[in-house]
Structure formats: structure tokens, C-alpha cells
Image (cartoon, rainbow, N blue to C red):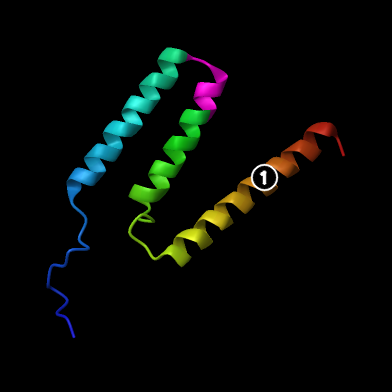
Amino acid sequence: MTDVNETTSETPHYAVYWKAWAGLLIITLAMLKLDSPTIVVLGITIKAFLILLVFMHLLREHKDIAITVGVGIFATVFVMFAVMGFDARGW
């Protein structure tokens, strides 16, 4: 058994969070500077995955949990856009 107060190699370092924050800032500034719809959508997608992996700790989780969360988020987004599409058409 391991002691609760023991530090392990799985303890995240704050440098990871600072690098992720810097990456988010750079992507945001690039999106503002380039102002292209394609760049904006690509930037939003990259930022979403960066937030999922780093700040929601999916990068360090077991693969099964990360896949479950990813599929759940994808399904939720798909349903939301499908409902908005039907509502926009007046069905």
C-alpha cells in the first residue's frame, strides 16, 4: 500500500498548465489577427482539445475514460447542432 502523502510521478507540474495557457493565448491572438472563418473554427477546435486534455486531466487518464468522455462530448455536440438545425428550418 502506498501512503496518501507520498508524492508520485503522476503529480502534475504547474509548467504544463502555464504552457497550455500560453498556447491558448497564442491561438486566440492568431484567431484575432487572421480573422478567417476557417482559422477561427480550427482554432476553436484546437483550443477545445487542449482544454480537454490538460485542464480536464484527460491526458493523464486511462484511455477508456478519455474515450468515454470524448464520445460523450461529441454526441452532445452532434445532438445540439442537429436540434438547432431542425429548429432553424422550422420543423
Q: Give the farthest residue toward the right.
A: 91
Disc 1, SS: helix
Quarter of the figure with the C terminus: top right
Above or below 16: residue 6? below
Q: How many marks?
A: 1
Is 56 on the left or on the right of 21, as rendered?
right
Above or below 18: residue 12? below
The residue that appears at 48% across and 32% down in the rendered structure is 44
Q: Give the farthest residue toward the front.
A: 63
Quarter of the figure with the N terminus: bottom left
Is 60 on the left or on the right of 73, as rendered?
left
Camera-side residue: 44 or 9? 9
The residue that appears at 55% across and 22% down in the rendered structure is 38
Res 61 → quadrant: bottom left
Tell me where residue 74 appears, x and y as whole percent: 59, 50
Tell me where residue 71 appears, x and y as whole percent: 57, 56
Is 19 on the left or on the right of 74, as rendered?
left
Give the residue type at disc 1. Answer: Met
Camera-side residue: 61 or 4? 61
Tell me where residue 46 appears, x and y as whole percent: 45, 36
Tell me where residue 41 appears, x and y as whole percent: 54, 28
Above or below 11: residue 35? above
Q: Main secondary structure of the magenta part?
A: helix
* Category of crowding for the residue at label 1, using alpha-carbon neighbours closer than 10 angstroms: few (below 14), some (14–19), many (at least 20): few
Which span of residues is magenta-colored? Answer: 35-41
Residue that label 1 marks: 80
The residue that appears at 12% across and 72% down in the rendered structure is 6
Q: Give the farthest residue toward the bottom.
A: 1
